[in-house]
Amino acid sequence: MAECRNIYLHEIITIVGAGSEPYKAHTGDGWAARWRDRRALLVGTWQQSGSTGEWPRVVNLWEMAGWDHWAEILEQQYRGVGQPRTLKTWWNKALEYRSGGFDRILEPAAFSPACRDLVAAGVKGRACLQEIATVRSGQVEVYLDAVRRRWQPAAAKRGFTLLGAYRTTMRDTEAVLLWSLPTVRHFTDYLQDVDVARDLVRWADTARQWRTDYRETLLI
């Protein structure tokens, strides 16, 4: 029997006006508790820094207990008899803060920590560095393994803690990485060094073997 592994829902939410903070609160205090009853966990909810990407945006990451669990959630959401009352109430309120978004279903790399691992380790940070990488077709797993062997040790020396390393499903050319940063200064120091520090230059040269493009954004 195949091992049951978590899968993840990665959401990029388009926010209306100044709704980022109330939407994060609405997600964390409201719907996260209801999803927990279905064994889904909110790994994180972040606001994307407008100086590093589109704004206003919120990024959510949900952890689910495998494909069967995701199927149960989809069945409840699209069962043809209307949304459950609690979901409908939450959804209607959320429309005050959001106008759309873009979602991915992610599968974790073998070394990617689960939510319980992050909690047990007491991982905390002021910010999160998100990388969405485009790699050559069929090379996602090889790239993620290189991240584990060659980039994660160097990143740890810079104070970065891995939150997740994933391949995007329904395509074979995309990986998503999330790193917890103790302070925003860790992010700006990283950017200042990216073209001159030996460890960063070495990693960039290595990553080009598989990575054809990537986009990093700062999440708060």
Image: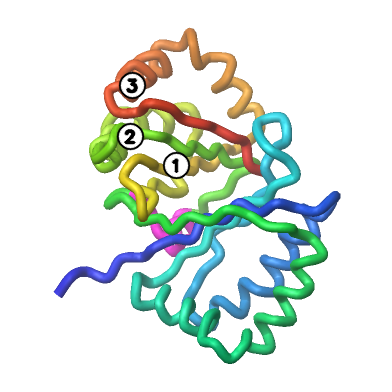
Where does the magenta region start and end?
112-121
Q: Are marks 1 and 2 in contact (CB under 8 Å)?
A: yes
**What quarter of the picture does the C terminus occupy?**
top right
In-image side of 152 versus 128 (left or right) = left
Which SS does the magenta portion mostly show? helix
In-image side of 66 versus 46 (left or right) = left
Q: Position of residue 162 (x, y in %)?
A: 44, 43
Question: What type is the residue that disc 3 sits on?
Answer: Arg
Tell me which label, 3 or 2, sits earlier in the chain: 2
Question: What type is the residue that disc 1 sits on?
Answer: Leu
Q: Residue at x 36, y 54 (%)?
A: 169
Q: Mark 3 falls on what kind of element?
A: loop
Relative to 6, is 148 above or below? above
Circle 3 packing at 10 Å, graded few (<14), some (14-19), many (20+), is few
Q: Residue at x 80, y 53 (%)?
A: 16
Q: Which mark is residue 147?
A: 2
Magenta stretch holds residue 178: no
Quadrant for residue 93, please give it. bottom right
Question: What type is the residue that disc 2 sits on?
Answer: Val
Q: Which mark is residue 208?
A: 3
Q: Residue at x 45, y 54 (%)?
A: 121
Task: Kindly identify which residue carries mark 1.
Answer: 177
Q: Residue at x 85, y 50 (%)?
A: 18
